[in-house]
Amino acid sequence: MVVAGVLDQAQAIESVDFNTLGLLVGMMIIVAITKESGVFEFLAISAVKAAKGKPMAILLWLSAMTAVVSAFIDSVTCVLLVIPITISISQKLNISPIPIVFSEVMLCNIGGAATLIGDPPNIMIGSVAGFSFMDFVRNLAPVLVVIAAITLICLYFKFRKTFAESEVREVHMLDINPLDEIKNKGLMIKSLLVLGLTITGFILHDVLHMESATIALAGAALLFLLARPKPDRVLKDVEWPVIFFFIGLFVLVGGLKEVGVLHVIAEGAIGLTGGELLPTGMMTLWITSIASAFVDNIPFTATLIPVIRDMGELGHIANMDAIWWSFALGACLGGNGTIVAASANVVAVGMLEDHGYKLSFLRFMIWGFPLMILSIAISAVYLLLFYLT
């Protein structure tokens, strides 16, 4: 964009959303230090014990746990922590990890949609729209709890026969003490304390008058001081390809905005809906979700954010917050449609392949797309009842 003369260098830098980048880096550092304590292995083994070693119960417990964890750490990091443990447990029980991993990915994307920090699209939307951590919890968490519960019920009926026909190996999983998985109790206490303080900071965002990136980076700095890890080891665990992908993406979108492409799209959308709240909200929800199922929701969200903002300015929509919530639900839940719809999906399937398990694009879509449509239909009813009328 700079070489082609669309933007100058100053404009390119201005188009980068450093609040999004700071929030991602800060949370990645906190998670990188926290995982060294063994707390995530502790949670996984605790879930297996709660399920009493039964495959279908393990699927439900691990998926529910993933939904909760993904609300507080980004979805890609959540997958990187949970999937290796899942595969290890599945191999010990002599069952296929594919249904469990698929279920975890579904619930990861649903749980991540509930908070500001759970899914990259929410991070970007929150930064632009000025929504706080608690804004996401108050407005999206209620419907997402319902969607998560219904999705778990659907997964139960989908995979119960699969596991009923499996020959489960007798292992003494129940004899394992989850506390044995804690590698460093002191580090765990410090990490959970800082994570709790950071989340409290997000909740008190409006009182503190600090951006979410400042809170996340302050939490990361505090944990560095308390835990004293080797900085080079921690920084290697930050997903730098993701960070630089975002930087490039923001510059590309800045170029599209500069030449007026996004403004034209916004005018076309307002022309279709007449700027009315109900049709604009429904169009945003359904088009965003379907498109996000076939285009990674991160670049799609980055591209559409200026369009949604321009739609608000052009259409004089009475309640733009409702449109932003429609957009957030569509972008995050659309990530369950296909493998390529969300970065977490790609990472999870890649990790399965690394261990010799194949989950094809078509099979993922056959399983995931109907669940995605169901979740969007529930979201549409929720928005219709509480926001778009």
Image: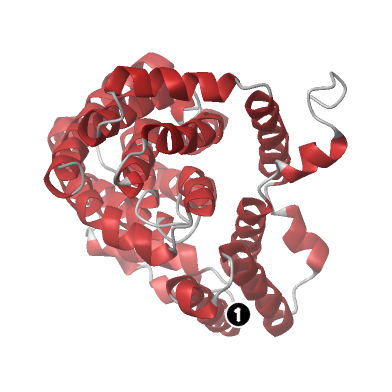
Give coordinates of residue 370: x percent, y percent.
Answer: 22, 24
Give coordinates of residue 340: x percent, y percent.
Answer: 48, 24
Identify which residue, 120 or 267, lies in the foreground: 267
Identify which residue, 286 or 362, lies in the foreground: 286
Q: Point out the residue furthest to the top here.
A: 362
Q: How many marks?
A: 1
Q: Give me the residue at 22% from left, 58% from top.
A: 51
Q: Is residue 357 left or right of residue 319?
A: right
- Quadrant of the drawing holding the N terminus: top right
Q: Give me the residue at 40% from left, 71% from top.
A: 178
- Label 1, on which residue? 187
Coloration of the structure image:
secondary structure
Identify which residue, 301 or 256, lies in the foreground: 256
Q: Quadrant of residue 185?
A: bottom right
Q: Is residue 259 above or below residue 94?
A: above
Q: Give me the residue at 54% from left, 53% from top.
A: 127
Give coordinates of residue 137: x percent, y percent.
Answer: 32, 61
User: Dot 1, crowdedness within 10 Å: few (<14), some or many (≥20)?
Assistant: many
Q: Is residue 95 visible?
A: no
Q: Is residue 88 visible?
A: yes
Give coordinates of residue 314: x percent, y percent.
Answer: 43, 32
Q: Is residue 150 left or right of residue 208?
A: left
The kind of secondary structure element at disc 1 is: helix
Q: Is residue 323 above or below residue 137?
A: above
Q: Amino acid at mark 1?
A: Leu
- Quadrant of the drawing holding the C terminus: top left
Q: Is residue 79 left or right of residue 33?
A: left
Q: Give me the residue at 53% from left, 49% from top.
A: 128
